[in-house]
Image: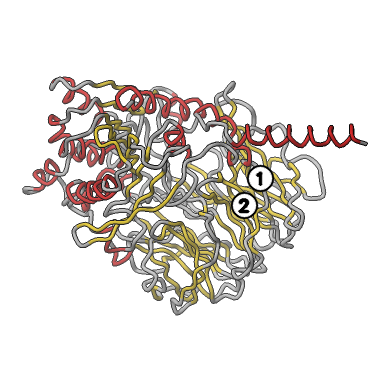
Amino acid sequence: MKIKQTTLLFIALINVFFFQIIAQKKFELADYAKFVNISDPQISPDGKSIVIVVSRPDYVNNRYNAELVLVNVASGKKRILTQDRFAVSSPRWSPNGEQLAFISKASQAKDANNQIFLLSMLGGEAKQITKAPKGVQHFAWSPNSTDIAYASLNEPKNKAEIEKGFTAFEITNNDIFVGSQPQPSHIWLVNTITAENKRLTDGDWSLPLVIPPSAPSSPFSWASNGKTLLFVKVATAYSGDGQNRTVQILNVADGTFKPLTTRTKLEAYPNFSPDGSAISYWFKKEGINESINELWVSNANGGEGKAISKKLNRDLFLSAWMPDNKTFLVGGHNDNKTSMWTMNLDGKTMPINIGNVSPSWSFWLDATVSKTGAIAFTGSEVNKPVELYFMASTNSKLVQLTEYNSEISKMTLGKTETIRWENDNLKHCGIVTYPANYEKGKKYPLVLVIHGGPNAASVEMFSRFPQILANEGYFVFEPNYRGSDNLGAEYKLAIVQDAGAGPGRDVMAGLEKLKATGMIANDKIGVSGWSYGGFMTVWLAGHYGGWKAAVAGAAVTDWVDQYNLGDTNVGRGAAIGGSPWIGDNMKKYIDQSPVTEAKNIKAPTLILANTGDPRVPVTQSYKLYHTLIDNGTVTKFIGWPIPAHNATDPVTQIETPKQWLTWLNTYLK
């Protein structure tokens, strides 16, 4: 008996020691391989299950392998639905719950197109139901559970001539890397029983064409009677014309359609109420592109209706009808959080209690509502990566249904908190992550990691790179600045025609507040960021001294290049002061471009860029590189041959922070 007790005690001590080892493991770049991403939760019509997309990095093939997983709401048990498919997305239940449609590659070939597949919930293999020559972008089930509307690019009208070598095409408002005539996207209908495809729309106009990072294309929305379909029409397929978007009501029987309102731009994300009597949609506040998304509700017959989200005054990135036809689930950034609320037709808003969980956000809030009013979403906490969450109603207790990333939660992580300050009569907040194993009274080097956008925000959530830096012994400061989308329309618009100076003062005021705590080694501060965060990095390094290192990723340095060569090109004009080629506007562009004062940068600077980036063309990084080199600043310029603003492959996604971290360690330690 004594031997048995001794053995049990020994085993218990071993277990305690084992778990302490896990808890004390340093979180580092190699642990990126352990991350499991969860997205696009869809609740089954009977409310008993949620299907999610689960993806893991595959470094051998340099891709993410994804699968559809069915999660039982009551038990949390999981069942993999798709086999031998490395690419799956957009799972959508048929309204009767008997089938699940999803998008996947038609073959394992690298250039294979996305098509729609159907999976019977009674069992069996998924079957392909579309063979769109240009693939499928997104789709929506008809209420009859038989038809599916989907979006697909047109083939070129002069396809035969192109094949013979006649490849000339017209260039208008598009990015510098456009290699052929941009083709419009249009609506098709497929019958899931006969696999018969029918074109519903055609023309030189287009459905929205999304170039990431941005919100997804406005999805289709069917009326409850299955006779009409809501979609968004864009004037042309050229990306610079994307502001000219309007909500349309399509008669499915004959393909005719009419506009919902008399507006000509900035409408998006229409959605029929469950009973089909009303239509909700987004419109930019006061018709200003740089302002916040407001939620509008109109009669199903048409008309502007009324804006119901004015009192909330937040930039909405979610609006889903609740089953009662008079309430919405809405969401967006809110101060130092990503929040969700219920909102009725009179604009009365009530916050939903989700504790410290921050719903996943990427210019879109990853949440869904069931027929019973249940909510499913993916989200994270500051010390817990993304998982799946469920609420039986908006007043119910939040339940975590998965633990895909529990191993990472047990690693050594830095404490995260919010810091607040005021500048120029504006209130600001930022996120501070402490060094892992922080010791009170000791001073630590600091790295600023500035968010891009500027239509975005840093909030309390799990952030991989700041935690990597924390485990390297750094304080990390993620400041929000005027132009961020977390404090309403006035705050967001305060950046218009003040791209760098005002935001620069905001960040520096926050930095001074942090330095005043006495925790920072003031002679070891670095500044860094990607996209608009890169813009801010170059601006701050050129206008303020004291930096010991800088990392400028995909940095906007010259607004003239951004206007002429970027994917949204002319759409940027109003934010800077109109076209640079009209009147005296060029001076505004020069004054607000970081490259103008980049000659003053003394901090050793690492420049990072994707050479085929359509959002921030690499020309701007070249200008920064030559400015710094010619003025004797220690500089290194690293590029990746990637035709995107953000890399989507796992190898580059770990290479980029590795370069970033190595540079900071070289000059801050």
Q: Is residue 644 visible?
A: yes
**Disc 1 crowd, CA 10 A, few/some/many (<14, 14-19, 20+):** some
Q: Which label sits on residue 403? A: 1
Tell me the element at label 2. strand
First along the sequence among labels 1 and 2: 2
Q: Nearer the viewer, residue 383 or 589?
A: 383
Q: Is residue 304 visible?
A: no
Q: Nearer the viewer, residue 145 or 370?
A: 370
Residue at the spot 42% in from the left edge and 23% down from the top edge? 164
Instruction: Specify the quadrant of the image occupied by residue 168.
Output: top left
Mark closer to the observer (1, 2): 1
Residue 263 position in % (x across, y down): 33, 66
Quadrant housing the N terminus: top right
Name of the residue lying farthest toward the right: 1
Read off the residue under disc 2: 41
Q: Amino acid at mark 1?
A: Glu
The tally of labels here is: 2
Residue 260 position in % (x across, y down): 42, 68
Residue 227 position in % (x across, y down): 59, 66
Name of the residue lying farthest toward the left: 584
Q: Amino acid at mark 2?
A: Pro
Residue at the spot 36% in from the left edge and 72% down from the top edge? 310
Residue at the spot 71% in from the left edge and 31% down from the top edge? 84
